[in-house]
Image (spheres, coloured by chain):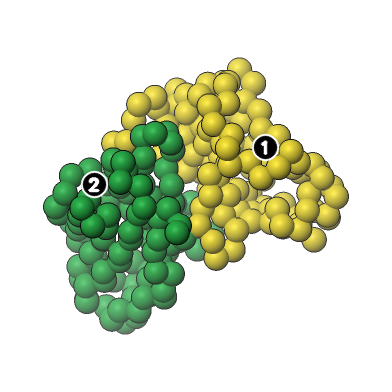
Chain colours: A green, B yellow
Amino acid sequence: QKEVEQNSGPLSVPEGAIASLNCTYSDRGSQSFFWYRQYSGKSPELIMSIYSNGDKEDGRFTAQLNKASQYVSLLIRDSQPSDSATYLCAVWAGGYNKLIFGAGTRLAVHP
Amino acid sequence: EAGVTQFPSHSVIEKGQTVTLRCDPISGHDNLYWYRRVMGKEIKFLLHFVKESKQDESGMPNNRFLAERTGGTYSTLKVQPAELEDSGVYFCASSQPGTVPNYGYTFGSGTRLTVV
């Protein structure tokens, strides 16, 4: 079992729709969770972090965390073509002192 | 504030040659990480420096890879001799001490290495 799992996609949504990206992780000791966005040929860019169970909203982005289910998700409301990118889920497990990444989900928002 | 800088941005070398990648972290960031992404796979951890010391090098694939961070500033990652499977994008990231759980890392733009 991979430490951080994501559906590779592509996830295709129409402009204006809600995009839902999911991530599961294996280490129950994981403490912090991050979503990075990576455009083709560019570096990963942090867009959201979440530490506590529940929802965290920032603009059009909402991160959701359920530690009991070891599940993290990212919702993007009113999706725009500019949101088309690969979204990487990353997990901080303090014992490892580093971020563990999933393979990423490619999102395509079509007009 | 300058970001994390990596160079070269691209490198194409022949199998058996040597390549050295460089990373300049954000000034004041003691933590420096190297990661690698092979096509279609996850970004995999290679190693972690705290200042000039290797904190964790558990992700280094084999002894053809040598990372250094003399003086605790910039870091180099040398691959010698390069093999075809070393192709990928090598990312460097940095952070201030104790901030990763809250703020994650800042990544450089990566070096795309192609071994032919």
Instruction: Point out residue B84 in the picture as x, y percentages from the top left corner.
Output: 76, 58
Instruction: Point out residue B82 in the picture as x, y percentages from the top left corner.
Output: 78, 49
Instruction: Point out residue A31 in the picture as x, y percentages from the top left corner.
Output: 28, 40
Q: Nearer the viewer, residue B1 or A24?
A: A24
> Please, what is the three-letter code of the amino acid marked with disc 1?
Leu
Q: Is residue B67 left or right of A90 when viewed as pictured?
A: right
Tell me whether marks 2 and 1 sit on the same chain. no
Residue marked by disc 2: A50
Q: Chain of mark 1?
A: B
Name the secondary structure under disc 1: strand
Residue marked by disc 1: B77
Q: Is residue A15 left or right of B22 when viewed as pictured?
A: left
Identify whether A91 is placed above or below B77.
below
> Please, what is the three-letter code of the amino acid marked with disc 2?
Ile
Identify whether A105 is placed above or below A66.
below
Q: Residue at x 66, y 33 (%)?
A: B67
Name the secondary structure under disc 2: strand
Q: Quadrant of the C terminus of chain A?
A: bottom left
Q: Nearer the viewer, residue B114 or B49?
A: B49
Q: Chain of mark 2?
A: A
Identify whether B84 is placed above or below B26.
below
Corner quadrant of residue A72:
bottom left
Q: Residue at x 63, y 41 (%)?
A: B60
Identify whether A20 is placed above or below A43.
below
Q: Residues within 10 Å of mark 2 (few under 14, many from 20)?
A: many
Q: Residue at x 22, y 43 (%)?
A: A51
Q: Residues within 10 Å of mark 1 (few under 14, many from 20)?
A: some
Instruction: Point out residue B96 in the picture as x, y percentages from the top left corner.
Output: 40, 27
Q: Gap between marks 2 and 1, in whole Å? A: 32 Å
